[in-house]
Amino acid sequence: MPRSTLPRHAMRSGAGWLACAPPQTQTAFLESLSDRALAALPWLFEFWALPHQTPPEGDWRSWVILGGRGAGKTRAGAEWVRAEVEGARPLEPGRARCVALVGETFDQVREVMVMGPSGIMACSPPDRRPKWEATRRRLVWPNGAVAQAFSAQEPENLRGPQFDAAWIDELAKWKRAEETWDMLQFALRLGRHPRQVVTTTPRNVGVLKTLLANPSTVQTHAPTEANRAWLAPSFLEEMQARYGGTRLGRQELEGVLLEDAEGALWRGAMFEAGRVAHAPRLSRVVVAVDPSVTGHGRSDSCGIVVAGALTEGPPQDWRAWVLEDASVSGASPQRWAEAAVAAFHRHGAERLVAEVNQGGDLVEAVVRQVDPMVPYRAVRASRGKAARAEPVAALYEQRRVAHLRDLGVLEEQMTQMTARGYLGRGSPDRVDALVWALTELMLVPAAQWRRPRLRTL
C-alpha cells in the first residue's frame, strides 16, 4: 500500500510516537485507519524503523550500517532492498532491477538475507513477495526485478554480472573481503546512480576502514540495546553480565569499531587475554592523576586511573591489576580533584600520584583543598610520553598486568599509543595516568629492590 494510506503525522513520527502515546490515543489512532491502511501497517517499514535503519539523505554510493549483535541490521538491509526494487504497485518497476546479495557464504545469503526471520521473504507483503529460484540462486519479484545471491568465498563469480544495487552482509568477517569487494564494485555499474548497503558488526579490518573513509560513504550506528523491544530480556541481561564493559562487548554489543594503530605498544588482544572479573587481595593500591589545567568543554580530560599490585617475592613475580578508569572530561580543577580523592577512598588506596609538569604546586594545593590528609606524591615527566609508556607496555607483554571491565575508553587510547607517539585525537590523558600508576606500583619499587645494598662492617 502507498504511504498516503496513513496520516502524515504518523509517518513522520513513526512507531515511537504510537508506542509512547496513552492507550486511548493508540486506540483512537488505530480506529481512525481504513481497512486498507490497517492491513498495510505491518509492511510499512518507514513507520516502524529505528533511526539507524533509515537510509540517510544525500548523494551517497555506500551506506554502512554498523551495529551490535541483534541491533536490526539484517532487517534494515532487507527493507532497503524492498524499497529499491518495489514500485508504487506490485507490477510497477522500482529504482533497481538487478540486485546483488553478497554474504560470507551462499548458505548464509539464503538462510539469513533471503529466508531468515528478518530476511527479504519475511519482510515482503503477499502481493509483492518475490519467488526464490533455488537452482539459479536468485529472487524474482512480480515486477521482474531480480536479486542474485553470491558468496564472498567465490569472488570470481562477480565477474560478468552487472547491478544497479547491492546488499552486502557482515563484510567485516569475510576471509576474502578485499578481493570480493573489489569485484563487486566493478559490477555495480547499472542505472543512473547505483548504490549499496553494507550491514555489519564492526571489526578492525582494512576493507571496512577504507570504505568508511570514502567520501561517498555514509553510516548509521546502533548498539544491541537499541533493538531491545524485539530481543529476549534474558539475552540482553546475559550478554551485559558476561561481556558488558569489555573490549569484546564494545565491538559485539555496542557496535564500536576498535582499531589498533600500526606499531601500537598495546594490542586489543592483550586486554581480552588478561581480563578478570575481580582482583585478588592486593599489596598496594594507588590512584594516578594526569591533571588538566583548564576546565572548560574543549579541555583535555583529566586522566584518573586506579591500579593495584601484588608485590610478594622477587619483582618478576609481581602482578598488577587496573581497577578503574575514573577520568573526567571538561572538569574544573576542583571537580577533578574531588573525583580523584573519591576514587582514592573508594578503593582504599595508599597514595595519590599526580603529574605536576603543567600545574606545579597548584596540583597539590587543589587536592589538599578536597582532603588535606590524603597521602600525595608529585611526579614530573623528564621523558616523552612514548618513552615513559614503553616499559609499562613491556609488563603487558609479560602478562603481568590484568584489566577489570569497564575500561573501554582507556583501552582505545592505549591501542593508539606507538613508539612514535600518540596517534589518536587529543591527549592520551588516560594512558598517562595509567603509566604513572603502574610505574609507581611496579617499576619504581622493582628498581629499588634490585639496587645493591651497602654492606655494613
Image (cartoon, helix red, strand yellow):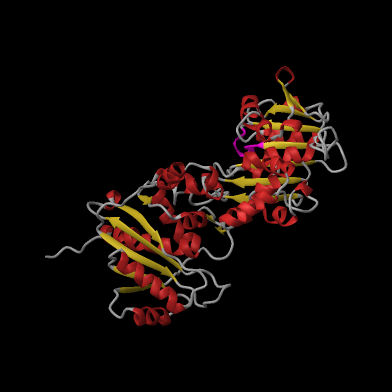
Q: Is residue 118 left or right of residue 334?
A: right
- Residue 149, given in percent of the width and then of the height, sits at 71, 27
Task: Say whether residue 170 is magenta.
Answer: yes
- Residue 304, given in percent of the width and then of the height, sits at 42, 66
Taking the image as drawn, is residue 364 in sight? yes
In the image, residue 366 sits, relative to residue 24, either above or below, namely below
Q: What residue appears at the point 23 percent right and 53 percent down from the top-left corner?
A: 312
Quadrant of the rendered image containing residue 407: bottom left
Q: Residue furthest left?
A: 457
Q: Nearer the viewer, residue 160 or 402?
A: 160
Q: Is residue 419 left or right of residue 127?
A: left
Task: Say whether residue 67 is magenta.
Answer: no
Write the start and end of the magenta stretch as one range.
169-174
Quadrant of the rendered image containing residue 25: bottom right
**Quadrant, the C terminus:** bottom left
Q: Nearer the viewer, residue 431 or 85?
A: 85
- Residue 400, given in percent of the width and then of the height, sits at 35, 49
Q: Residue furthest right?
A: 192
Taking the image as drawn, is residue 53 in sight? no
Q: What residue appears at the point 58 percent right and 72 percent down from the top-left corner?
A: 298
In the image, residue 64 sits, relative to residue 445, either above or below, namely above
